[in-house]
């Protein structure tokens, strides 16, 4: 257990009216060179162009024991993220130059599975869906409470460290839970970290209908949340289904109207 800083308990809205302030493209600490990685420390890359928000995140996360690297521009963020060595990326969507969605898309196209939490100033469904479609694992709408950011970060980091587990299979779908790989008819599925966890959860409950509430609790680690996760879960199920079922003869992931989802061979 890492030492707790006071930041976890203080309510501080991050990124509120600051969003309206002038954008500073360069500020102290931006895109600092990547230090030699030490495996004991969790490293977080923060891509955020607003200096005040970036500093607040660096200080707050630093107080929690995280090793934080800041990038103020999209290009710097992309090259740092692509260099590997980060356990998580906090990515602002509105950035000068290449925006957060472009960076995220590029990162995922290159096959980088690092968990990404996006920050968006606009609370619109289309923004959130665009971010999740581009491969984000979670999002927060500005302004947000620092304690909530910490909770989301912890959940994403937990997700990346699964318990060792045996092989799981259904029809020609094979999942290696320990190796975090999945194949369908011998073809490797390119899944994000979150999609993999979702698939593993569905597969462990194969033949059993699981509700969105169960998924929110078990996959997102969130028993209760201010805004329901239903839309987020539906988007991820849709993306997962596209990858698992689209090129196969037999569908494995099924929607049970009004209830949730079930994974089984053939129609439910
Ligand atoms: Ca911004």
Image (cartoon, rainbow, N blue to C red):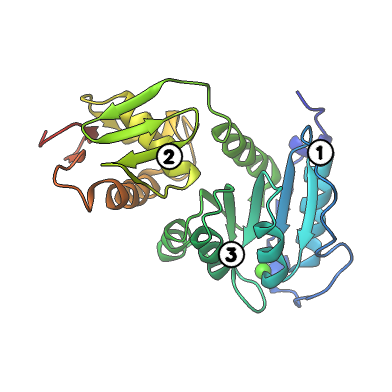
- The residue carrying mark 2 is 196
- For the point 68% across and 52% down, which residue is it? 84
User: In this orientation, which residue lies closer to the viewer: 190 or 76?
Assistant: 190
- The residue carrying mark 1 is 38
Kindly indicate the quadrant of the structure image that contains residue 19: bottom right
Mark 1 and mark 3 in contact (Cβ < 8 Å)? no
Quadrant of the drawing holding the N terminus: top right
Cα–Cα gap, marks 3 and 1: 33 Å
Q: Is the CB atom of the residue marked by disc 3 within 8 angstroms of ligand 1's nearest atom?
A: yes
- The residue carrying mark 3 is 121
Q: Residues within 10 Å of mark 3 (few under 14, many from 20)?
A: some
State which mark lies toward you, 3 or 1: 1
- Please state the horizontal and vertical placement of residue 257, each as a whole percent of the image: 16, 40
- Of label 2 and label 1, which has the lower sequence position? 1
- For the point 34% across and 40% down, which residue is it? 183
Residue furthest toward the right? Answer: 28
As drawn, is 26 to the left or to the right of 112? right
Mark 2 and mark 3 in contact (Cβ < 8 Å)? no
Q: Residues within 10 Å of mark 2 (few under 14, many from 20)?
A: many
Cα–Cα gap, marks 2 and 1: 26 Å
As drawn, is 188 to the left or to the right of 249? right
Cα–Cα gap, marks 3 and 2: 28 Å
Kindly indicate the quadrant of the structure image that contains residue 174: top left
- Please state the horizontal and vertical placement of residue 236, each as a whole percent of the image: 37, 48
User: In this orientation, which residue lies closer to the viewer: 117 or 35?
Assistant: 35
SS at mark 1 in the image: loop
Q: Is the CB atom of the residue marked by disc 2 within 8 angstroms of ligand 1's nearest atom?
A: no
State which mark lies toward you, 3 or 2: 2
């Amino acid at each position: 257990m890492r030492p707790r800083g006071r930041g976890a308990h203080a309510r501080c809205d991050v990124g509120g009216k600051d969003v309206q302030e002038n954008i500073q493209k360069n500020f102290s600490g931006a895109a600092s060179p990547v230090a030699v990685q030490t495996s004991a420390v969790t490293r977080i890359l923060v891509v955020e162009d607003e200096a005040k928000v970036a500093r607040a995140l660096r200080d707050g996360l630093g107080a929690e024991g995280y090793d934080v690297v800041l990038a103020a521009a999209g290009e710097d963020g992309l090259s740092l993220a692509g260099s590997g060595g980060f356990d998580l990326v906090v990515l602002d969507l509105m950035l000068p130059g290449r925006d957060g969605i472009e960076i995220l898309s590029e990162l995922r196209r290159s096959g980088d599975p690092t968990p990404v939490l996006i920050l968006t100033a606009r609370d619109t469904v289309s923004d959130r869906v665009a971010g999740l479609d581009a491969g984000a694992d979670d999002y927060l709408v500005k302004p947000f409470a620092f304690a909530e950011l910490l909770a989301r970060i912890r959940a994403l980091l937990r997700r990346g460290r699964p318990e060792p587990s045996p092989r799981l299979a259904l029809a020609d779908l094979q999942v290696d839970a320990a190796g975090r790989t999945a194949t369908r008819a011998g073809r490797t599925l390119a899944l994000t970290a979150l999609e993999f966890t979702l698939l593993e959860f569905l597969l462990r409950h194969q033949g059993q209908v699981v509700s969105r509430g169960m998924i929110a609790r078990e996959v997102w680690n969130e028993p209760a949340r201010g805004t329901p996760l239903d839309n987020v879960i539906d988007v991820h199920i849709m993306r997962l289904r596209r990858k698992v079922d689209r090129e196969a003869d037999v569908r494995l992931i099924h929607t049970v109207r009004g209830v949730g989802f079930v994974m089984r061979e053939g129609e439910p």
